[in-house]
């Protein structure tokens, strides 16, 4: 795992129920969004050369791990070694949201908004928040009811993130607090290019 600005970027080996297979996954976690654990946001699985989901059999690990590592480097949606640009990360959140299809993962918008705020790009943050508000208008009533139970209504949620856009110090302070809470301050770092 490494830190790129307020973003944690890493690989995880997800173990199967039988504990004999594992699936390498690339993931991101945004420290600007408080959460009690590190999430596997925008998790992307390793694929076979033919494009199917792949796994590694623990019995053959010593023979196949180099190939899997090479494919993971090639398939990773973001570079695992180079500095990253904020627009690349926001685009990845956006693409992941699109891949979810009918999913209603508004947390991806929270990630985009807070990352843009942290980077000093209030116009990008506002555009993403406006896009999220528009998106919620297409939600069926049962989804709006679930959202209301978790976050209050859309207007309250939007106002909260609108205030964060006006107060970037709050977002930066949250990222610092989350970094300390999760003890990730000493991770290797790459630059986040704006």
Image (cartoon, grey):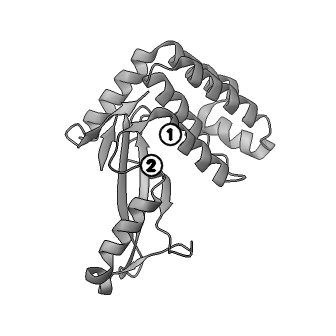
The spot of residue 123 in percent (x, y) is 58, 18
The spot of residue 113 in percent (x, y) is 54, 29
List the residue tagged with mark 2: 78
- The relative height of residue 70 versus residue 126 in the rendered view (above or below) is below
The spot of residue 131 in percent (x, y) is 69, 30
User: Is 109 placed left or right of 10 in the picture?
Assistant: right
Front residue of 162 and 143: 162
The spot of residue 71 in percent (x, y) is 41, 67
Instruction: Report the residue that reaches farthest toward the top.
Output: 166
- The relative height of residue 149 versus residue 12 in the rendered view (above or below) is above
Q: What residue do we see at 47% from left, 13% from top?
A: 167
List the residue tagged with mark 1: 88
- The relative height of residue 21 versus residue 124 in the rendered view (above or below) is below
Decide if residue 105 is in sight here: yes
Q: What residue do we see at 25% from left, 81% from top?
A: 62
The quadrant of the image that shows the C terminus is top left
Disc 1/disc 2 C-alpha distance (Å): 8 Å
User: Is 144 placed left or right of 158 in the picture?
Assistant: right
Q: Secondary structure at mark 2?
A: loop
Front residue of 29 and 5: 5
Q: Secondary structure at mark 1?
A: helix
Q: What residue do we see at 61% from left, 21% from top?
A: 126
Decide if residue 37 is in sight here: no
**Circle on res. 194:** none
- The relative height of residue 156 versus residue 9 in the rendered view (above or below) is above
Q: What residue do we see at 23% from left, 36% from top?
A: 185
Q: Earlier in the sequence, mark 1 or mark 2?
A: 2
User: Is 33 placed left or right of 50 in the picture?
Assistant: left
* Residues at marks 1 and 2 touching, judged by CB atoms closer than 8 Å: yes
């Amino acid at each position: 795992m490494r830190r790129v600005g307020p973003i944690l970027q890493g690989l995880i080996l997800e173990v199967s129920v039988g504990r004999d297979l594992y699936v390498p996954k690339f993931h991101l976690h945004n420290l600007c969004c408080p959460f009690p654990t590190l999430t596997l946001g925008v998790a992307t699985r390793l694929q076979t050369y033919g494009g199917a989901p792949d796994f590694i059999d623990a019995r053959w690990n010593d023979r196949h791990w180099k190939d899997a590592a090479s494919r993971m480097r090639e398939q990773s949606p973001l570079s695992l070694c180079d500095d990253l640009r904020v627009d690349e990360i926001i685009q990845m959140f956006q693409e992941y949201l699109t891949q979810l299809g009918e999913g209603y993962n508004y947390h991806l918008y929270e990630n985009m908004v807070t990352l843009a705020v942290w980077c000093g790009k209030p116009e990008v943050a506002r555009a993403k928040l406006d896009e999220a508000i528009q998106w919620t208008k297409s939600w069926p009533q049962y989804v709006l009811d679930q959202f209301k139970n978790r976050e209050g209504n859309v207007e309250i949620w939007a106002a909260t993130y609108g205030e964060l856009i006006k107060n970037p110090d709050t977002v930066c302070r949250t990222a610092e607090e989350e970094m300390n809470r999760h003890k990730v301050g000493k991770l290797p770092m790459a630059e986040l290019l704006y």
